[in-house]
Image (cartoon, rainbow, N blue to C red):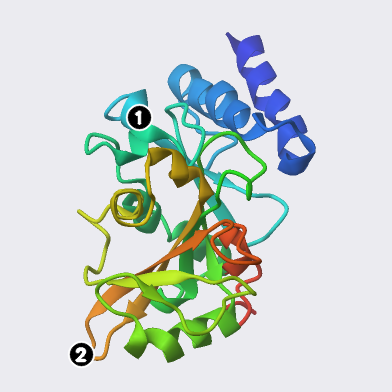
């Protein structure tokens, strides 16, 4: 058993110190499934992940993985095999609310920062099918680029309760947005809102990149803006929402 432990603590080092994009599209799933979940179940360690949650079984579990290429960047990855935003399971009420779980786990960034980041520093995103490199669903947890923060705050008065075309582009892409008047995303299902309100059918979900941005509304109520970037809807749209993120947390980190 001691030899087994040594093997499974040493093998992940190869994966950890090799950038994820250099692997095949199943690299992230292999790290979570073959290493993090195995170590958690067999050895009581979540290494090389930051967290593994399996209290309700693998179908409702998730792992938090740090991207070693960037300082302030984590991923929430389901322990259930799901391809991505196009997975039909995301439109079912029994599926875990992965965006809410990502928001609950945003403080992993604080551990790197050394103290709590302000609420408006964070952002959660998922890329469209063509805008990603990995074949396992993952939600990015990182900081928002400062100029994107300013743009969203400036446009907030014109973003309504229903889907609204943003007047200004974000990183050259045309987003639609709507207000979420709930401070922690509990009971708010972004995938369902896009699937039921924007996607023409379930097959169209693959085109959407999704971002959830914390905001403070005019009445000081804390909430979010839900953003959708549909690949191909207009010129330059790719569904690659990850480019809204700042992995240095510039403006918040020293």
The image quadrant where one finds the N terminus is top right
Image height check: is 75 above or below 248? above
Q: Which mark is residue 219?
A: 2
186 and 114: which one is in front? 186
Mark positioned earlier in the residue sequence (2 or 1): 1
Residue for point 74% across, 42% down: 21
Q: Residue furthest top?
A: 1
111 and 230: which one is in front? 230
Q: Which mark is residue 182?
A: none
Residue 87, by quadrant, is: top left
Residue for point 36% across, 56% down: 198
User: For numbered disc 1, what is the local secondary structure?
Assistant: loop
Question: Where is residue 204 shown, x and y percent of the image?
Answer: 45, 44
User: For numbered disc 2, what is the local secondary structure?
Assistant: loop
Q: How many marks?
A: 2
The residue carrying pointer 1 sits among few (fewer than 14), some (14 to 19) or many (20 or more) residues within 10 Å by Cα, namely: some
Image height check: is 5 above or below 216? above
Residue for point 55% across, 31% down: 32
Image height check: is 40 above or below 243? above
Question: Where is residue 7 shown, x and y percent of the image?
Answer: 69, 17
Residue 62, by quadrant, is: top left
Does residue 93 appear left or right of residue 206 in this picture?
Answer: left
Q: What is the CA distance from the residue labelled 2 to the residue labelled 1?
A: 39 Å
Residue for point 66% across, 70% down: 248
Q: Is residue 118 visible?
A: no
195 and 179: which one is in front? 195
Q: Is residue 108 visible?
A: yes
Question: Where is residue 212 shown, x and y percent of the image?
Answer: 41, 64
Does residue 73 appear left or right of residue 68 in this picture?
Answer: left
Question: Where is residue 105 shown, x and y percent of the image?
Answer: 40, 54
Q: Which mark is residue 54?
A: 1
């Amino acid at each position: 058993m001691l030899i087994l432990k040594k093997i499974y603590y040493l093998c992940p080092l190869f994966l950890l110190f090799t950038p994820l994009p250099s692997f095949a599209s199943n690299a992230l799933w292999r790290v979570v499934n073959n290493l993090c979940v195995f170590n958690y179940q067999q050895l009581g360690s979540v290494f090389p992940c930051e967290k593994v949650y399996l209290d309700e079984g693998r179908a409702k579990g998730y792992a938090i993985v740090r991207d070693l290429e960037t300082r302030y960047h984590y991923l929430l990855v389901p322990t259930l095999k799901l391809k991505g935003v196009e997975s039909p399971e995301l439109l079912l009420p029994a599926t875990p609310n992965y965006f809410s779980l990502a928001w609950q786990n945003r403080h992993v960034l604080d551990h790197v920062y050394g103290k709590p980041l302000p609420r408006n520093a964070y952002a959660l995103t998922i890329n469209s099918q063509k805008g990603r490199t990995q074949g396992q669903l993952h939600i990015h947890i990182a900081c928002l680029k400062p100029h994107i923060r300013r743009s969203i705050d400036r446009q907030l008065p014109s973003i309504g309760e229903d889907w609204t075309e943003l007047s200004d582009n974000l990183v050259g892409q045309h987003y639609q947005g709507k207000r979420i008047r709930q401070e922690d995303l509990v009971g708010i299902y972004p995938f369902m809102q896009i699937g039921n309100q924007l996607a023409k059918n379930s097959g169209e979900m693959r085109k959407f990149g999704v971002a959830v941005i914390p905001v403070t509304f005019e009445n000081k109520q804390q909430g979010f803006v839900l953003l959708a970037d549909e690949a191909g809807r207009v010129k330059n749209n790719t569904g690659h929402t990850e480019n809204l993120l700042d992995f240095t947390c510039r403006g918040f980190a020293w």
